[in-house]
Every structure is written in C-alpha cells, then in structure tokens.
Image: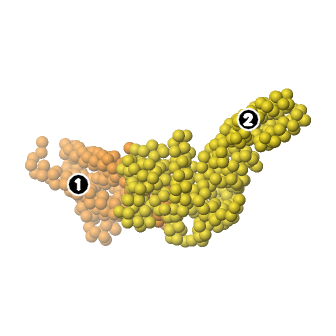
Chain colours: A orange, B yellow
Amino acid sequence: MFEQGMLLLVGEAFLETLFMTLVSTFFAYVIGLPLGMLLVVSDKDGIYPIVSLNKIFGVIINFIRSVPFLILLVAIMPITKIVVGTIIGPKAASLALLVAAGPFVARLVESSLKEVDKGVVEAAQSMGASPFQIMTKVLLPEATPSLLLGFAIAVTTILGYSAMAGICGAGGLGAIAINYGYYRGDKEIMYVMVVLLVLIVQVFQELGTRISRHSDKRM
Amino acid sequence: MEEKEAMIQLRGVCKRFPQKKDTIEVLHNIDLDIYKGEIFGIIGLSGAGKSTLVRCINLLERPTTGQVFLDGVELTSLGEKELRAQRHSMGMIFQQFHLLMQKTALENVMFPMKISGVPKAKAQERAKELLELVGLSERMLSYPAQLSGGQKQRVAIARALATEPKVLLCDEATSALDPNTTAGVLSLLKDINERLGITIIVITHEMSVIQKICSRVAILDGGDIAEIGSVEEIFRSPKTQVGRELVFHDGEKKEAYVGHVPYCYRTVFKGDSANEPILGNMMIEYGAPVNILSGNTRNIKGGVFGQMILQFPEDAEVRGKMIQYLRDRKVEVEEVEYV
C-alpha cells in the first residue's frame, strides 16, 4: 500500500509519538504528583489544612483545565516564544503539553489519594504519624493501584494531546495525519494513523489496567 | 471505693462542632477518671457522644475547652510533635479495623513501629510475637482482604499493642462482628489486660460487651455522664432512664415494649438465690399470683444475675408484704414505670 519512503516516515513518526508522549507524561507527573498531593494535604478535611492555598491552586488548575488543548496551544504561543524561542516544532509543543497535562495529572492524583479510607488515616494519626509519614507511608502506598490506573489515563490523554500538537509541527503520527491526511486529502493515510493511535491507546490502557489489578491486594 | 491511681483524667472537657448557623455541643463539661489497669466501659445510645469522647482522649478531636491527662501528662497543653510522641503510648482499635489494605498482616503490625523509628529487624521480631499473642502467626503473610472480620480485628489489636502502649482505646471494636467472634475478641482483650496490665477503654452501645469484660462503666447520655460506677452497681440498680433502658433492654428502643403497666417491679436475683423457688413459695404463702412480664439471666464479672419484671397484685397490702418477702431474701426490688 505504501512505498518504502512512506513506511520509513510512519515508523519514525510512531517513535516520535511514543517519545513525546512518554517524556511529556514524565514531566507532567513531575509537576502533577506533588501538586495533587498538595491539594489533598491542604484540603479543609486534609491532614494539614491550608484552605486558602488549596483554593488558589484549585482555581488555577480549573482555569487551565477548562481551556481546550488546541486553544491552549495557540493561546500560550507568546510565552512559548519567550521560553522555548520558537512556536513550532516538538519543543514548542512540549511546553503546551506540559501546561495542559500537569494540572490534569494533579486532579488524577488528587482523586486517587482521596479514595483512601479516611479511617486508615485516622488510625495512622492515632499512632502518632506525622502528616509527611501519612502521605508517604499511608496515602501513596494505599492509593498505588488507583494511581496506576490514573497513569494509564494520563498517558492516553497526553497521547491525544500530542497528536493535536501535530498542527504546530510537533511531528509524530498526528502530524502525518494532519499533513498527509487532512491537508492533502489522503484518507488512506489518515485512517492508518488513526488505527495506529488507537492501537497505542489500547496497549497502554490494557497494560495500566493489568499492572494496577496485579498490584492491588484488596481482592 | 479504694483510692486508685488515675491513668486518664478528663477535666471539664467540652467539644463543640461549628455548624453553618450555630454550633453543636457534643460533650458538656465531662469530668472522668480512668484508673490504671482497669477495663473501663463507656456506653450510650447512638448519638450520645461516645466516639467523640474517646477521640478526645487521644486528641484525634481536640476538646474545645478542658484538659486531658495521660498518666499525669497534660496532653491538651502539648504541641503537635510532643502529642505525636505521647500517642505512641496509646493504641486504638476501630469498628471497621482500618488496616492498611495493601500490606500484609505482618507489615500492618510493623507499621506503628516504623513510624516511631524502631529498627526494621526488631520491629519484625516484635510483630511476629504480637501476631502469635493474638493467635494469628500462621496468617502473618495474608493481606487484610484474605482475613475474616475477627482475624482483622486481631491484627488491629496486635498493631495497637506494637508500641507497648499504656492505654488501649476500643471504639465499637466488636460492633461489626458476629456474637461468636465478639466473644473471642473480648476474651483476648481481657487476657491482654490481665497479662500486660494495659488500661483498656471500651466504647460500645451493647450492655453485653460491658458485662463481659468491664470493671467500671460510665453511661453517656446527650453529651453528659448520666451515671458512673462499677458494672455490678449499675446493673443492679440503674438510677437514670437511659441506664434502665440499657440494662433492661440492652439499648433497644422502648417503644417496642408494652408501655405503662401498673404495679410493675424489677427484681434482681443473685446467682446463689437461684436454688430456692422463691417466687413459687411467695405466691403460695400469700395466695395471690404475680405476672411475669419478662426475665433474663446475665453473666457479670461478679457472678450470675437474673432479672425479672413482675406485675404484683392490685391489693396494696399483699403487694407490700410480697415485696418485703423478696427483700428479706436479698432480692432487689424496684418499681419501674414502663416495661
């Protein structure tokens, strides 16, 4: 169906997409994990309530989360220009990916940590555990299966973002789908890209679900 | 009662929870002494403030006003860090166990030691001993989800004992367990109290739990201590309405009962008077029947007690004589308003 040059292009784009997704996810967690923990800890029913701080971060996160990714990508271009030096290419797109994915991951982490039974936290407090010990020795270990499920969701969502980032020349499968499929009207290539993206999502989701289930000792 | 050294002292403890419009006061000015080495029961109907009271002892809830002392140390004056250190000497178990679900029984028991900085090898050794003490050494590597309710509570007890506490707080520890398992857990608590000399505080809504293991009991009603005394005293002659409800009907709603019936008396027979057919002899002697409305037998620390609610004859003279007859035979007789 494809000539060899096209196959090479697709192979390269596939790796680009994987790379972009995983690196962005990694940095999204570098930001999102502590932010999510902070949201849980500082909550009014949390283990170290700081309600004003919690409110401020909550509003900022909601603000970013409510902007569709494609709009965000364009909207922060002036900032991207200053920080990255250019508004096109994978580097430029990765900043937008980070800005969008960080708060998203923070919410995922927050909801996982909040699933932990309040009674277990109370029990740890009754033993004299400090807020830091409760976070590291109770909340994170107890929430691990849920955090892993959240990770799978994060990867697949960021994969979707990275495909959208193809519009600003970020490369990857999304860029091929847009450049060849959309701009040139080559539907065949577009469908192949869609199938490939779907496959990646399936693999990550299935992997995440399995690892999560395997790590969960509640059943 | 002889002078005893206090382990826990509450002085003027109030707890108010701010609501949207006003505040709700859950505990009013509680004064309470719990002695070293005793098993002390706190009983009350739901909503009486029992759980709040026990949480005020280890300051999971800070009292709004008042002082809490643990073995002479005023907990209410301590900062967070010192308070955490003091909490190592108070274990607590819960109705829903609250075990770490992602950790094995052994890791759960090691957990409080990990928190207080005990070296891992030592913690593991002690955790194994404790699991043996509660009879679970062969389930050491099981996760909580693989254990039954009773086994989970045993793990929780071992965990609570890990830091060698002076006090063990039990918040409705048997309320989620079936009667057989409850009996097992209660006798384990009693055993721990006797063997290790740990002061135990039991919160419950079931009189039967108090009867099985407690030496003294406080009845909590609407945020006040309605009655306090030895379990035997409270059982033989509860002085308050709520006390009677708990003792007569084990806290069940009295609406389910007959209602007001005239000439009703509650009689309490001690175990040794059971050999003589006192009631039968009394009815033959005075030639008048009495109506037995309810009766049961309870096992209390001091021995076996039988209680009966009797309706005596209308004739005041015969009634008086009958009551005197019973009192002469060391049967406690007390008029009751409802059945």
Location of the C terminus of chain A by quadrant is: top left
**Which secondary structure lies at badge 1?**
helix
Residue A18: assigned label: 1
Q: Amino acid at mark 1?
A: Leu
Q: Give SS at disc 2.
A: loop
- On residue B251, which mark appears? none
Q: Nearer the viewer, residue A213 or B218?
A: B218
- Residue drawn 19% across and 50% down? A180
- Residue at 57%, 56% in the rendered image: B200
Crowdedness near tag 1: few (<14), some (14–19) or many (≥20) residues, C-alpha within 10 Å: some
Q: Is residue B268 left or right of residue B211?
A: right
Front-most of B277 and A133? B277
Horizontal side of residue A130 vs A209, given as left or right: right
Q: Residue at x 87, y 37 (%)?
A: B321
Q: Gap in Å between the C-alphas at discs 1 and 2?
A: 90 Å
Q: Position of residue B247 (x, y in %)?
A: 69, 44
The amino acid pointed to by label 2 is Glu
Displayed quadrant of residue B16: bottom right
User: Which residue is at 47% across, 52% downward?
Assistant: B156
Q: Which residue is mark 2?
A: B276
Task: State yes or no: discs 1 and 2 in contact (Cβ < 8 Å).
Answer: no
Q: How many marks?
A: 2
Query: Could you say where residue B204 lies in the image, as x and y percent from the top left?
Result: 61, 49
Q: Nearer the viewer, residue A103 or A68?
A: A103
Q: From the viewer's perspective, is the residue at label 1 or at label 2 nearer? A: 2
Label 2 is found on which chain of the structure? Answer: B
**Residue B227 appears in the picture as rendered:** yes
